[in-house]
Structure formats: C-alpha cells, structure tokens
C-alpha cells in the first residue's frame, strides 16, 4: 500500500540514497510482482519476479528524473505495464491472467477446506482467467489496476498515460466483454471473483 512518505524516499533515491530506495522496494515489491503475474498469466511466479526486478532496476535508474506529479506506486505500475507489454511482444506470449484461487473464489474461512468448494473456486477462477485473456492489453491493465490494485480512475489514467475519459471507456468495454463472456456459462460468476474497488 502506498505511504505518505513514498515521495520523499523516491526523491532521496534520486540523490543516490540506496537505503531509501530499498525501503520502497520492500514496500511495493509484492504489489508489482502480483500485478505482473496477473497481467502475464505465466504458469510460474519466476517470470513475474524477474520482471519486478527489471521494474525496480528501471525505477532506480530513472529515480533522478522522478517528479512527484503522481504517487510512487502509480509510477511503478506505469513502468511495470510497459515491462509486461514489452515482455509479451518479445516472447509472443498469449494473453492470460492467472487469479489466485483464494482471491478469486469469493469464499473464505473453514469452508475452503471442502473439496467441492475448492473445485468450484478453481472453475470460476479459470473462467475469469479466460475471459480476461480476451481483453485488449489496455483493457486488461485497466481492469487489473482498478479491481485488484484499487487504483482510482485518475491513477489508472496516469499509469496508462491517457485521459480519465479513456479509462472510463476502457473499463466500460472491458466489463461489457467480461459480462458477455462469463454470462455464456454462469451469469453471476463475475461478481464472485472480481474484488470490489474502492472509491473512484
């Protein structure tokens, strides 16, 4: 989660303060890895971990030119989005998003120990993964940033370097596509697997 002292830390990193940058890496590494993992839909987390390392290396190199016009995490997601797109272009990966069963299932507590509920959760997660795989890269990024990272429309616009109106359009079309794909099998699948976002 972003912290109020991210900006001073990044500005210090821009002056060569490695300790300040290490704090930022420790604070935001999990979010960047999770974002890359879901965006790429890789079968293992190693690729996402490698990309996260590239993101933070790029961030360290760019730290001297950082300007606090946006949150540091938003800036990191922008770098991560470009890294993911470059990776997919370079290796011609097929688009897919792997969702964690626990996050995707909508179930929690002791019931998750039941095999029937775990099977339903896996089935729902796979349906959503396939549905998100149908989205364009920008729509996929917008959905992930909104529903899984909790970014506001303004922050998503900053990450994707576009307007808030364009983000609204991307999310509208993405949700429309997801609804159409998911309703073919189970009309109420999407609300169970897409986390509710925070404030717009």
Image (tube, rainbow, N blue to C red):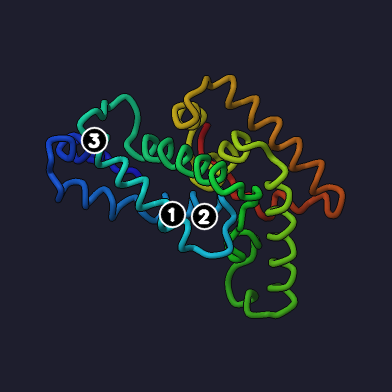
Question: As rendered, which of 19 and 53 lies closer to the eye?
Answer: 53
User: Does residue 139 sit above or below 48 in this rendering?
Assistant: above
**Disc 1 on helix, strand or loop?**
helix
Task: Name the residue beneath numbered marker 2.
Answer: 37
How far apart marks 3 and 1 lie (CA) works out to 20 Å
- How many labels were placed on the picture? 3
Q: Which mark is residue 54?
A: none
First of labels 2, 3 by sequence position? 2
Could you classify mark 3 by the number of other residues whose Cα lies within 10 Å: few (under 14), some (14-19), or many (20 or more)? some
Q: Which mark is residue 63?
A: 3
Q: Position of residue 112 (x, y in %)?
A: 63, 74
Task: Name the residue beneath numbered marker 1.
Answer: 33
User: Does residue 153 sit above or below 151 in this rendering?
Assistant: above
How far apart marks 2 and 3 lie (CA) works out to 24 Å
Q: Position of residue 50 (x, y in %)?
A: 41, 56
First of labels 3, 1 by sequence position? 1
How far apart marks 1 and 2 lie (CA) works out to 6 Å
State the residue at coordinates (18%, 34%): 11
Judge left or right: residue 58 versus residue 133.
Answer: left
**Disc 2 on helix, strand or loop?**
helix
User: Does residue 91 sit above or below 78 in this rendering?
Assistant: below
Judge left or right: residue 52 versus residue 89.
Answer: left
Seen as rendered, the residue at the extreme right is 184
Could you classify mark 1 by the number of other residues whose Cα lies within 10 Å: few (under 14), some (14-19), or many (20 or more)? many
Cβ atoms at labels 1 and 2 below 8 Å apart? yes
**Disc 3 on helix, strand or loop?**
helix
Judge left or right: residue 93 versus residue 153.
Answer: right
Q: Position of residue 114 (x, y in %)?
A: 68, 80
Cβ atoms at labels 3 and 1 below 8 Å apart? no
State the residue at coordinates (65%, 48%): 95
State the residue at coordinates (83%, 47%): 183
Could you classify mark 2 by the number of other residues whose Cα lies within 10 Å: few (under 14), some (14-19), or many (20 or more)? many
């Amino acid at each position: 989660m972003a912290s109020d002292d991210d900006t001073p830390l990044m500005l210090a990193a821009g002056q060569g303060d490695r300790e300040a940058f290490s704090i930022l890496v420790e604070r935001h590494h999990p979010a960047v890895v999770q974002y890359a993992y879901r965006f790429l839909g890789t079968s293992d987390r190693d690729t996402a971990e490698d990309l996260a390392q590239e993101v933070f290396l790029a961030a360290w190199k760019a730290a001297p030119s950082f300007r606090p016009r946006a949150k540091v995490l938003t800036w990191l997601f922008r770098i991560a989005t470009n890294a993911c797109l470059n990776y997919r272009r370079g290796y011609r990966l097929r688009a897919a998003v792997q969702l964690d069963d626990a996050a995707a299932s909508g179930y929690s507590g002791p019931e998750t120990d039941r095999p029937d509920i775990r099977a339903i959760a896996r089935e729902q997660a796979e349906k959503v993964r396939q549905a998100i795989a149908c989205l364009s890269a920008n729509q996929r990024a917008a959905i992930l940033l909104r529903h899984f990272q909790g970014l506001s429309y303004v922050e998503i616009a900053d990450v994707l370097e576009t307007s808030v109106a364009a983000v609204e359009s991307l999310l509208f079309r993405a949700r429309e596509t997801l609804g159409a794909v998911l309703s073919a099998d189970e009309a109420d699948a999407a609300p169970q697997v897409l986390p509710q976002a925070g404030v717009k």
